[in-house]
Image (tube, grey):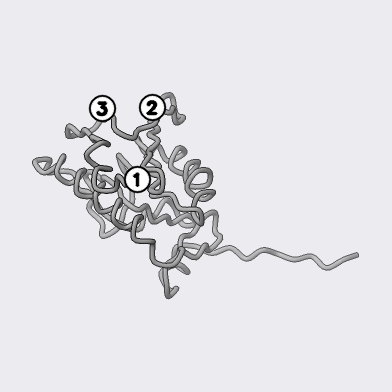
Amino acid sequence: MGAVYAIETYTYEDYKLWKGDWELINGMPLAMAPSPMRDHQRIGAEFLSFLADEIRDCEDCEVVYELDYIVDSENVLRPDIALICGEEADYITKAPKIVVEIVSPSTAKRDEKVKFEIYEKEKVLYYILVYPKILHAKIYKIENHVYQKQGDFTKEKYLFDGLECAVELDFKEVFKKFKR
């Protein structure tokens, strides 16, 4: 009989002790990619700025950048941008209203499949995947417990419904600085 190997899993308590940037998915540690490329950071800053402007008068909500979302003891994600409401902790403890992930070749599978499924299960109301190289975004919204694609966006406007505050993103404006 051959050797039996057990895969060691970890919890949030372990995660808190690690140095460096990590995510914890189903108890498995996943190293974050090195510092994001310039386009990733610049587009992230634009989304952060536009969302923050949209909710400026909304007292219960805020937009955060790369803040840990503790889903449960075995899942800790770090969305690029999240719109959260009614959060009291120093990190995200309940499903954000909007999550924005800036997709790069090194994160595509994690963002498009693994995180997609977790955000859907946790009922994050809107999930936005942004592709900086082609200045394109995909928006998904929870409807009947599953994500329904709302569309592909490059220069269109989108009005988010079901939020505490009115939020509209004008993708033409968000991407304007990056047109080559």
| Residue sticking out furthest to the top | 144
- Give coordinates of residue 73: x percent, y percent: 46, 57
Contact (Cβ within 8 Å) of mark 2 with mark 3: no
Q: Which residue is mark 2?
A: 150
Q: What residue is drawn where x is 52% and y is 62%? A: 30
Q: List the residue tagged with mark 3.
A: 161
Q: Nearer the viewer, residue 11 or 168?
A: 168
Please report whichever mark, 3 or 1, sits nearer to the chain's N-terminal start.
Answer: 1
Q: Which residue is mark 1?
A: 100
Label 2, residues with CA under 10 Å away: few <14, some 14-19, many ≥20: some
Please tell me which residue lies in front, 121 or 57. Answer: 57
Specify the amino acid type for callout 1.
Val
- Of labels 1 and 2, earlier in sequence is 1
Examine the image and state in which quarter residue 57 appears.
Answer: top left
Q: CA distance from mark 3 to mark 1?
A: 16 Å
Is 56 left, or right, of 32 in this rendering? left
Residue depicted at 14% across the width and 44% down the height:
53
How far apart, in angstroms, are the residues tagged by discs 2 and 3?
A: 12 Å
Secondary structure of the residue carrying numbered label 2:
strand
Judge whether 91 appears above or below 164 on screen: below
Label 3 with label 1: CB-CB less than 8 Å: no
Residue at the limit of the structure toward the front, as seen here: 180
- In which quadrant will I find the N terminus? bottom right
Say what secondary structure mark 3 lies in. loop
- Whether tag 1 and tag 2 are in contact, CB under 8 A, the answer is no
Q: Secondary structure at mark 1?
A: strand
Q: Position of residue 132 (x, y in %)?
A: 38, 48
The number of numbered discs placed on residues in the rendered structure image is 3
Q: Amino acid at mark 2?
A: Gln
**Which callout, 2 or 3, points to the residue nearer the camera?**
2
Where residue 155 appears, x then y in whole percent? 29, 33
